Image (cartoon, grey):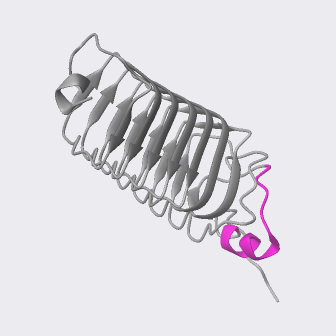
Amino acid sequence: MNKELLIIPDENLKYSEFDNQELNNLTINNKSIDDTTFTKCNLKETKFDNVLFDKVTFFNCDLSNTTFNECSFHNIIIDNSKLLGANFYNCRFTKVTIKNTNARYLNLVDTKTKELSINDSDFTESTMFNTILDKTSLFNVNFTQTEFSEMSLANLDVSKCNISNIRVSPRSIKGLKINSFQALDLINILDVKVID
């Protein structure tokens, strides 16, 4: 497969492998990418519109400033990659694993997730807006200064994550699972005063 094949409007990818490829600044519309592995690929600033990703692995890839609009992700692994400033609009995630990934400044908007697992990753100063996080597993994720807006965090366990200075409404954190140290970080959100 070559770079030009990705931009042919009716061509789908299946059983493909891309290694150390420059696939940046592309526009990919109305495609299906199945059983495909991207290793050490540069996909920076690529725009994916209405793309179905199924059984796709991104290993050591750069997806910085990439935009995903109305895309579906099924059985996906994103490992040791960059999602700096990546944008996900109206997407669906099912059985997606993100690990060892730099996702600072990521935007997740109007997106639904089911069985999302995020481990050992940095989501500092990211934004999640009107997003459903169903059956989400989080371990050692840095959410420092991340904004959670117009969404419920009920039953989300962030007790093994850094949530320093998150921006969230008191209504959104109802039912959020935290550890005792994190309670101190969230006390300001509740607009209460602790008196010793």
**In the depicted structure, whether residue 158 falls above or below residue 91:** below
Q: Position of residue 82 (x, y in %)?
A: 39, 56
- Looking at the figure, which quarter contains the C terminus? bottom right
Q: Residue at x 56, y 50 (%)?
A: 98
Q: Position of residue 50 (x, y in %)?
A: 38, 20
For this view, does 112 lie left or right of residue 176?
Answer: left
Q: Residue at x 66, y 66 (%)?
A: 161
For this view, does 54 lie left or right of residue 10?
Answer: right
Q: Residue at x 76, y 77 (%)?
A: 181
For this view, does 88 lie left or right of residue 41?
Answer: right
- Looking at the figure, which quarter contains the N terminus? top left
The quarter holding residue 5 reads top left
Q: Position of residue 190 (x, y in %)?
A: 70, 62
**In the depicted structure, whether residue 181 falls above or below residue 152:** below
Which region shows up in magenta?
175-186
Tally the numbered discs: 0
Tell which of 163 and 70 is nearer to you.
70
Tell which of 159 and 145 is nearer to you.
159
